[in-house]
Image: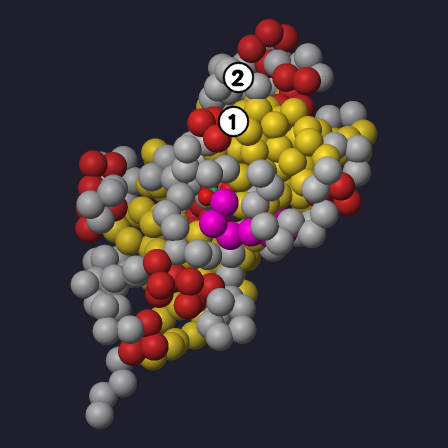
Amino acid sequence: MTHTTLSFLKGHGTENDFVIIPDPDNAIELPASAVAALCDRRAGIGADGVLHVVRSAAHPDAAHLADRAEWFMDYRNSDGSVAEMCGNGVRVFARYLHHAGHVEPGDLAVATRGGVKQVHLDKAGDVTVSMGRAELPEGEVTVSVGEHTWPARNVNMGNPHAVAFVESLDQAGNLYSPPPFSPASAYPTGVNVEFVVDRGPRHVAMRVHERGSGETRSCGTGACAVAVAAIRRDGVDPAVTGEPVTYTVDLPGGTLAITEHPDGRIDMTGPAVIVASGEFEAAWLGETAFA
Ligand SMILES: N[C@@H](CCC[C@H](N)C(=O)O)C(=O)O
């Protein structure tokens, strides 16, 4: 009897953790059930999501980006759902590409379902991702926890966010289930919800309930959405002042620096770490593990 094994690595960015599946030729089928099994913290390896590492040319969702970015981050939430972008994931993905010898430190491009992201990778230090521009759809949005309902800012960072400024992060409660939002039409595919308090000038702290993953200890796109909402609230929009502005965003798993430039581009800087590598039986993922 032969045992086919698959390689994996484990990494995190400000404790938003990922199972990394290297698969340059896109030969591994990852149905939602397989992703959920990998991310299960008791019966699997355990993570907030999966970073499936595929050559852009080999994946139907990224082949059109292959001339701009060799590698595609096929990101999945821990429930197996597909998301457009994962900010912490891009930093960890870039760290993995260097760890595996695919890229040198410096500037590189990563293809995502939210477009090509430019990354600057220090050999051992932080990783900076050019996250693109935020969209701020018009319209009133609210989010609720228990008896509390707050107005929220609708911010799209490639994926959807609702940012609510609260008096205390404890008001978000246990976040075991997705906070209800209104109107339903604001987020037809669900939403990541951020709860934010002030820590000082241009310094905030947040908790997040992520669509498809539950409460996580960090969310990179969420931190960008929070910074954008805080910048508008504080009246320091770089498009108006002509000056870039940087906000420090504390999360349960660490700290990210978010800079918005006068042309609306947003940079996110933070750590990215590979912590382990190993192998598992392909059969464990089921008979559909190979495409
Ligand atoms: N943790 C990520 C966001 C992952 C995707 C999100 N759950 C969604 O469904 O949009 C980040 O660091 O940005």
Front residue of 179 and 263: 179
**Depth check: 35 or 234 in front?**
35
| Disc 1 packing (10 Å; few <14; some 14–19; many ≥20) | few
How far apart marks 2 and 1 lie (CA) works out to 9 Å
Q: Is residue 131 left or right of residue 235?
A: left
Q: Position of residue 72 (x, y in %)?
A: 31, 47
**Disc ID at residue 183:** 1
Marking on residue 139: 2
Residues shaded magenta:
211-218
Residue 20 lies, with reference to residue 138, above or below; the image says below
Magenta part mainly helix, strand or loop? loop
The amino acid type of the residue labelled 2 equals Gly
| Residue in view at x 26 percent, y 80 percent | 4
Does residue 48 appear in this view? yes
Comparing 179 with 74, the one in front is 179
Residue positioned most to the bottom: 1
Q: Which mark is residue 229?
A: none
One can see residue 118 in this view = no
Q: Quadrant of the N terminus?
A: bottom left
Residue 148's spot in the image, x, y percent? Answer: 72, 35
Q: Residue at x 68, y 29 (%)?
A: 150
Mark 2 / mark 1, whichever is N-terminal: 2
Image marks 2 and 1: residues in contact by CB distance under 8 Å = yes
The colour scheme used here is secondary structure
Q: Position of residue 203 (x, y in %)?
A: 74, 31
Count up the numbered dots. Answer: 2
Badge 2: how crowded within 10 Å, few (<14), some, or many (20+)?
Answer: few
Looking at the rendered image, the quarter that the C terminus falls into is bottom left
Q: Secondary structure at mark 1?
A: loop
Q: Is residue 215 magenta?
A: yes
Which of labels 2 and 1 is toward the front? 1
Q: Quadrant location of residue 182? A: top right
